[in-house]
Image (cartoon, rainbow, N blue to C red):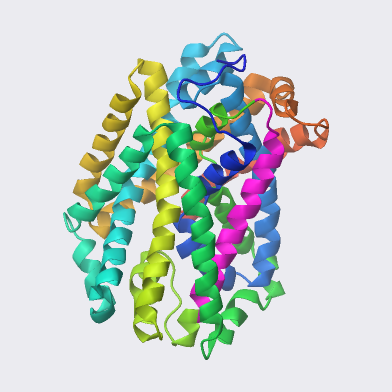
Amino acid sequence: MSENKMHRNGSFSSAIGFVIACVGSAVGLGNIWLFPYRLGQYGGAAFLIPYLLFLFLFGWVGLSAEFGIGRLAGTGTIGAYEYCFASRGKKSVGSVLSWIPLLGSLGIAIGYAVIMGWVLRSLAGSVTGVLMEAEPAAFFEQAATNFGNPLWHSVLVILVCVVLMLGVTAGIEKVSKVLMPLFYVLFLALAVWVAMLPGAWEGYRFLLVPDWKQLLRVDTWVMAMGQAFFSLSITGSGMIVYGAYLSKKEDIPKASIRTAIFDTMAALLSAFAIMPAVFAYGLDVKSGPPLMFITLPAVFQKMPMGQLFAVFFFVSVAFAGITSLINMFEAVTESWQTHFRLDRKAAVLICSALTLGVGLFMEGQDRVDAWMNFITIVVVPIGAVLGAVSVYYVLGWPKLRSELETGREKPLSRWFGIVGKYIYVPLTILVVILGFIYKGIG
């Protein structure tokens, strides 16, 4: 597999297809319901300084490392960790440790599917008009209760299952090439329309007028780091499997930076579409599920052509969420295929059944919140640390450098390895520590 043989699941047909699929994985609910709030709360335009700094750093040396080990090993999470530790004669150690980031991907998928079920229900309510007439909080609470949304939850998991049954080239890449451009178009249309609302300027003030004093606060830098880290889906698992499907002809560091740029564009588009509308109608600024499922439906109910834009919004969120969920499923599926020698369809079905079977018992908001807090505060950050340490220290920078320079016209900067080993890896450890202290930073 490491000798540039094509993976049995296929490969991405081009660098563009690869980047779009990776952007689809990175762009998710965090861009939509958390970034706009944090941008405003932590200094507006001033917040962008630490955020973009961390985003570039994590994209440059973090994403590149995960893509690189995936392509070098020619396989996903379990095989990649085994590859790293086999270089030190400890393959079995790598096999054991790999289950932490892999379970992180499965854990996020379980909670994410619950939330995306709520999105599909809200989309259906927007199309039929039920959401436009209901009290938003009551409409949301009907779904966010135990066993409150099994229909749309199941539809979502089945949809992702079918996409993955089609394989990588026919499934992930083609779906991402359609859904992600539409996401940007729909959010851009929504942002333009919102800009014409009376009172929208207050939302732009919230987002863009810099409060430079915020840069002196530790919390601003902590939240900027957390937002950038989690936004890029650096989990020690998901992006590794996409790297396994990448041709040796492609420039990994360039693809990583492009992924970070498009992810930032999605976050900013979301902010410009959401916050000005919230301020235009004098509603409370919130983050998380209350913003997306309660505040914004209240906005759409008051807007001219509100039903149309409610449909636009929830279609866009569905696109972003589905492409992210596809990556989570693929990380688990590929590893089980390779490690247990399972047929692809069997691996996809097992992953889907587990995701839905466990998720059905945590459809209540309190349960899914507790679940996602545990996964994102404990499991995923620890998985990311294991990934960073495995690549930069266990495998070693010389081998990673050789892989990352494959497909490039110019050699990497000598600073790349230094930043990766002595800045990026310690920062991933810091993310774990700060996550416990702040009870979540992403």
Q: Is residue 442 visible?
A: no
- The one of 296 and 310 positioned closer to us in this rendering: 310
Task: Return the residue nearer the eye: 419 or 355.
Answer: 355
Residue drawn at (59%, 33%) of the image: 66
Front-most of residues 325 and 10: 10
Asked if residue 325 lies in the magenta stretch, the reply is no
Q: Residue at x 55, y 35 (%)?
A: 385
> What residue is at 40 percent from the left and 49 percent from the top?
322
Residue 336 x/y as whole percent: 37, 23
The percent coordinates of residue 217 (x first, y second) are: 65, 66
Range of magenta residues: 248-276
Visible residue check, residue 177: yes
For the N terminus, the quadrant is: top right
Most extreme residue toward the top, as rendered? 89
Find out whether residue 270 is within the magenta segment.
Answer: yes
The residue located at (43%, 55%) in the rendering is 319
**Residue 143, horizontal then vertical, whole percent:** 22, 62
The residue at the far left in this view is 147
Quarter-wise, where is residue 318 in the image?
A: bottom left
Q: Nearer the viewer, residue 295 or 322?
A: 322
Q: Tell which residue pokes out farthest to the bottom in this image.
A: 198
For residue 212, what is the image quadrant?
bottom right
The percent coordinates of residue 203 (x first, y second) are: 55, 81
Q: Main secondary structure of the magenta part?
A: helix
Q: How many marks?
A: 0
Image side of residue 60 versus residue 86, left or right = right
